[in-house]
Image (tube, rainbow, N blue to C red):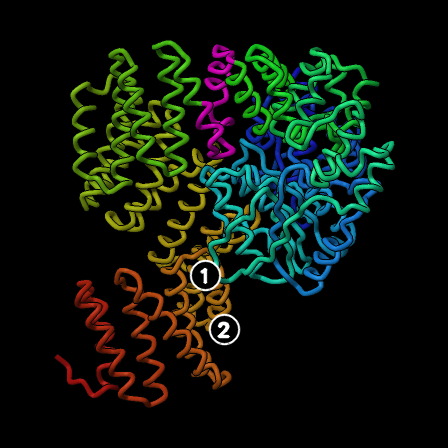
Amino acid sequence: MGLQTFLPIEILDYIQTHEPSEEAAYGISQRELAKALGYHPCSMSRPLDSLVEKGLLSARRGLVREGRRKQLTYRLTVDGRTHLKRETREVPILSGEMPPPPHPFLGRKEELEILGQLVRSGSAVTLVDGPPGMGKTSLISRHLRGAKRGRVPFWFTVRAASSPRQFVSALSHALSFLGNPQLAYYAQLPRNPVAREVADLAARALGSQPLVAVVDDFHTAGPDLRKFIGDFVTALAARGGHHFYVVGQSPAAFDSNDIVPNRLTVVGLDRAAAHDLTDRMGGLADRFEAVYQSTLGSPLLLQLAVSHPDIDADAATLPDAVVKQLPSFEIRAVLPVALANEPLPATLLAEDFGLPAGRLQDLLRIGILHKTLQDRVEVLQVVRSALLSRVGPGDEREAHLALARFYGRSHRPETLRERFLHLVDGEDWKAASHLLDEQQRVVLRLGYSETLRNALRHLANALPTGPTRVRVLMVEASLLRHHSDYGDAIQALRMAINESSGDARTICEAHLAIVELHLRLGHLDLARQEFKEAERLGPGSKRLTAYFMLSKARLDEGEGKSSSAAVNYQLAFELARKARSTDLALESIAAWSRLAELTGGPEVALKVIESALPDARLSGRMDIVFNLLLVRARAFAETGRGDQAEAEMNAIRSEAEALGYLTQLMYTLSGLVAVAIERGRWAEGGAFAKQASALAERLGNNLVLGHTLALLCSSELRQVDQGGDPRLLDESIAHGMRSIEILSRLPPSDSIVLAHGYLCEVYLYRRMQDEAMDHFQKATKYADDLRLGWLKERLTQEFGPRLGIPPA
């Protein structure tokens, strides 16, 4: 099957996951679909028209997410949802659905009772551990048949290549029916997901509905995913009402004092349940006791023993003995399932791997294969090891290439990445490097995992010296940079320089990339040295000329030369646009807009933003779009255009909420506080401050938290002064004191000056002169230390006469 065969399914799946509510201002456009799925926009026209004609999609004109003019937007129909559910059984796709419990389910009464008691007690996190083959997954699946009632279910099985972004994608699929697509858009952000932000978005999507979530095979998670899931579970469980099961061969560790997890260790079936199980499968007669003792009551090993009565082996050797009885062609047919990072459609074994359908049922019956959700099959770990011991390197390579062909049926990021991994394991170096060359951004989009890092290094080592090997090393450096592993990224770039055979252009680009990494690490002298090495070779191209200017601007900013940096960022932006290097242009404009207001004033910043916004929107860099809009709103306010500033912030707020850009939403809410206070709408300012401070606290941004609490202190005083509830004064003092407590832990800024100033004003209102004087003195001392003479003067003019301080 070609890629285009699966494109309609991918369209339906994307729309289902990202579909906004009926009343949302923005819809899903053809351009958005093309960008997300990796196709040219024109190639989307025919499949979209076909889906509309078949009644699977509806189309209407409306606003789209990455533009301001109306275009055709698409939604799933009822028939479309039904069709998608039926067709995705054969398409590689992330799933967040609960697997059905095994039938019949035998024994485990004690374990089920323990789990039930934990649910009834309101326990938030349960760790389930035990050796492989003991039936941990079956136990949790059976328990959740009743425990999930009234809750939103989510099941994520960790695989070797899983990353935090894949976890977020799976969660967004599971919650998509709630009609809240922020998580789906968040999963596409060009940065690593933050656990607390994901927990916040999940809570918003769930509303008042509790979540019951299972993370299975947690022991296979890499360090990054392990930490991410731990932080996510801790953050969401602390909100109450939700329950998590973390399943693995060893108990998970949570670095939190807020969550005390319960633990259940699963061992083998008791004698009665084991006897019942073996009887239902044919019985062991007088061999039962010996087999039961040998297998330690493992359901899987008991199944293997019953199906092979002629084999006399203990628990350690039974899987190997069973596999040895399989013909070699059956082992080769099953091998791709053993090597896959996820369960595969059962039909693949017959259609692609040559296993007769009748024999497939036999292998399921005897326990070699295990059936899971959506008619998929997998090989459990104890059998996988036995299968791999029976095959040679050539068979493994062929199995990996068969899996690469399977994943070649789809163009989704998940499947492109799996295809790349299997091409590397199959040692098809040419195809792997070609796929990476064509789909680098898509392959990297799912974020960091040890498996991907190892595959890139394996590919680089296997390729002969030359341009292709250098490109792979540059991709590895890009992955590590996005992962914030700057030291290893520098090492990968140095290897690329050594392998580049004197290619001045590649060496220059690598040196300039190292400049940025050293600046991120705070190594200013080393960054200067790298820049000189690049200068020695010279630019050589229009793109490199822009890159040189961008690096020079970064060095200037690192040295504290804000005016020079702003000028050079502007030049870098203009050069990058001429060279049509969108990535460099956007990096330049993001930094330039930040400095333009400080160095050139608001009018200069407005001109910068006006020229940059179209490119940022067209490239889909909504993170940069939001930052530009926030600077523009601030510039409007500073030039006396309060109405435009407020309208801009409200528009940003609406779009940031819709797309799940929490950091930008937090800054927007903080800006709306200032606008409301400036316009004398104290109650409204207080409401915005509460929202902004709550979000800042969840995201761990103490600077914004302390700043907005100080603004809340001021707005509550003004409400009392205008005849509001006098009890707000106590809250005003509490918020002001907490603001100072938080800001005192950070480097001093104008925010702590203002916080002390607001508290001085509150105490003056209460006629508590000593307390007011104390905060006034602290505020003016901070202002002196920070050389904020204008702010000290303002405080002295406003509070000096009321405190009995004579004019200077």
Image quarter (top left, top right, bottom left or bottom right) of the C terminus = bottom left
The three-letter amino acid code for the residue at tag 2 is: Ala
Closer to the camera in the image, 264 or 219:
264
Could you say whether the residue bearing mark 2 is in a helix, strand or loop?
helix
Closer to the camera in the image, 609 or 775:
775
The three-letter amino acid code for the residue at tag 1 is: Glu
- Above-or-below relation of 694 to 23: below
Q: Quadrant of residue 88?
A: top right
**Residue 129 located left or right of residue 85:** left
Q: Which residues are magenta?
A: 427-455
Q: Quadrant of residue 184?
A: top right
For disc 1, the marked residue is: 697
- Residue at the location (24% across, 12% down)? 502
Residue 69's disc is none
Closer to the camera in the image, 754 or 163:
163
Residue 742 appears anywhere in the view: yes
Q: Quadrant of residue 366?
A: top right
Image quarter (top left, top right, bottom left or bottom right) of the N terminus = top right
For disc 2, the marked residue is: 683
- Residue at the location (75% across, 58% down)? 113
Crowd around label 2: few <14 · some 14–19 · many ≥20 (10 Å)? some
- Residue at the location (27% across, 69% down)? 753
Residue 581: percent from left, percent from top = 37, 25
Distance between the Cα atoms at labels 2 and 1?
21 Å
Could you say whether the residue bearing mark 1 is in a helix, strand or loop?
helix
Residue 84 appears anywhere in the view: no
Asked if the stretch drawn in magenta spans residue 453, the answer is: yes
Magenta region's main secondary structure? helix
- Residue at the location (30% across, 21% down)? 495
